[in-house]
Image (tube, grey):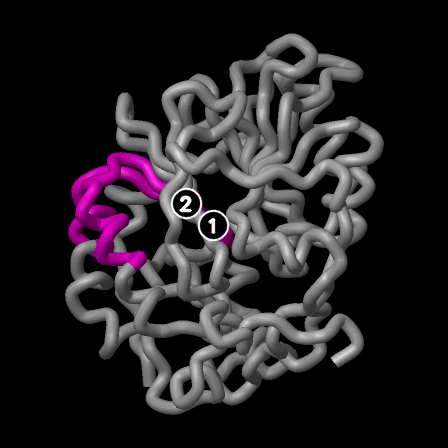
């Protein structure tokens, strides 16, 4: 069974206090970087407080039913009726695109994602089903019931530029980090070595409802029940660790920074097969790959 990598929270976790002066319900972790936890998942706001209309970006869009919370946080942080220049997706799993269709329409915002993720975002294909046999927790046990999509934002959907730029996020570049999904990407900024990793790795045991509730700070591989290519997931973690990040914002769990975080990330990369990969499972035995079409299912499947 995969194992956890515990971390001393006093030396690794970001101070989670909300900025009461702005009361925008986000946790600011850099002058132009904040996140909000919405149930089991985080969304990320990129832009300085008070940014004008179309001068900030939303990364991922949370669970279904959280549109109002995202819009409220955005209005408080950036200004009433302030719309993002773009919505950028790390990937299209249900907990990252729950409010996507509504927000993209109301804000009239372009949606950027890796081309391999587009079939899940333009109505063409559904994700492979979650694997409830891995992880051993309540969140994993329910994996077979999670929505698999697709959503359809086809008219607003754009491919991330081939040169690695992230539109409307100066200084950031995207990195293809497949494994958890075939078109998963992480975002990286050289200037301060900040990293938005989606679910390439996470900082809580996402398979466990208890761990999700208490948010104990630990370094983990991608959520097991949705990861479809374990060999590529390992390669992705190795690539991200090699960048020596100073700050990481994950899709699940608290953001983390500093040398203790980096040590744990390197250990995860080094010992990935032992600490992250399940001993058995549907996608360990038969990966769902884009190359052979196994990653894409008919929406009614």
The residue lying toward the viewer, choosing from 9 and 125, is 125
Instruction: Inspect the magenta stretch and tell me whether residue 93 lies in it.
Output: no
Q: Can you give x and y, in whole percent of width and height, for residue 232 in the image?
A: 33, 66
Q: Residue at x 38, y 57 (%)?
A: 201
Q: Residue at x 73, y 36 (%)?
A: 156
Q: How far apart are marks 2 and 1 (CA)?
A: 6 Å
The residue lying toward the viewer, choosing from 49 and 165, is 165
Range of residues picked out in magenta:
236-265
Q: How many numbered circles does the render carry? A: 2
Query: With 73 as the anchor, is 253 left or right in this view?
Result: left
Q: Can you give x and y, in whole percent of width and height, for residue 190 in the image?
A: 27, 27
Q: Residue at x 56, y 40 (%)?
A: 159
Q: In which quadrant will I find the N terminus?
A: bottom left
Residue bearing mark 2: 186
Q: Can you give x and y, in whole percent of width and height, for residue 73 in the image?
A: 69, 28
Q: Which mark is residue 49?
A: none
The answer to whether marks 2 and 1 mark residues whose Cβ atoms lie closer than 8 Å is: yes
Query: With 53 as the anchor, is 213 left or right in this view?
Result: left
Above or below 72: residue 221: below
Residue bearing mark 1: 198
Above or below 178: residue 12: above
Q: Can you give x and y, in whole percent of width and height, for residue 248 in the image?
A: 35, 41
Mark 2 secondary-structure assignment: strand
Query: With 36 as the anchor, is 248 left or right in this view?
Result: left
Instruction: Inspect the magenta stretch and tell me whether residue 259 lies in it.
Output: yes
Query: With 150 as the anchor, is 34 left or right in this view?
Result: left
Mark 2 or mark 1: whose residue is earlier in sequence: 2
Above or below 240: residue 141: below
The residue lying toward the viewer, choosing from 275 and 121, is 121
């Amino acid at each position: 069974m995969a194992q956890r990598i515990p971390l001393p929270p006093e030396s690794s976790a970001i101070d989670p206090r909300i900025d009461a002066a702005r009361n925008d319900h986000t946790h600011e972790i850099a002058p132009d970087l904040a996140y909000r936890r919405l149930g089991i998942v985080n969304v990320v706001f990129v832009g300085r407080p008070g940014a004008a209309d179309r001068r900030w970006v939303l990364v991922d869009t949370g669970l279904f039913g959280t549109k109002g919370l995202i819009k409220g946080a955005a209005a408080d942080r950036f200004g009433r009726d302030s719309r993002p220049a773009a919505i950028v997706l790390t990937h299209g799993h249900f907990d990252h695109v729950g409010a996507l269709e509504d927000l993209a329409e109301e804000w009239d915002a372009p949606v950027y994602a890796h081309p391999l993720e587009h079939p899940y975002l333009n109505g063409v294909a559904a994700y492979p089903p979650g694997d409830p046999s891995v992880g051993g927790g309540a969140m994993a046990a329910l994996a077979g019931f999670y929505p698999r999509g697709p959503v359809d934002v086809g008219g607003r959907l754009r491919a991330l530029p081939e040169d690695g730029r992230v539109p409307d996020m100066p200084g950031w570049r995207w990195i293809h980090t497949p494994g958890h999904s075939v078109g998963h990407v992480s975002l990286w900024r050289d200037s301060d070595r900040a990293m938005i990793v989606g679910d390439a790795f996470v900082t809580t045991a996402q398979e466990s409802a208890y761990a999700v509730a208490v948010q104990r700070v630990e370094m983990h591989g991608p959520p097991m029940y949705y990861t479809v290519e374990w060999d590529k997931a390992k390669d992705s973690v190795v690539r991200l660790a090699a960048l020596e990040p100073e700050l990481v914002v994950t899709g699940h769990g608290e953001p983390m920074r500093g040398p203790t975080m980096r040590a744990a990330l390197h250990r995860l990369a080094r010992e990935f097969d032992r600490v992250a990969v399940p001993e058995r499972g549907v996608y360990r035995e038969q990966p769902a790959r884009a190359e052979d079409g196994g990653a894409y299912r008919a929406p009614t499947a």
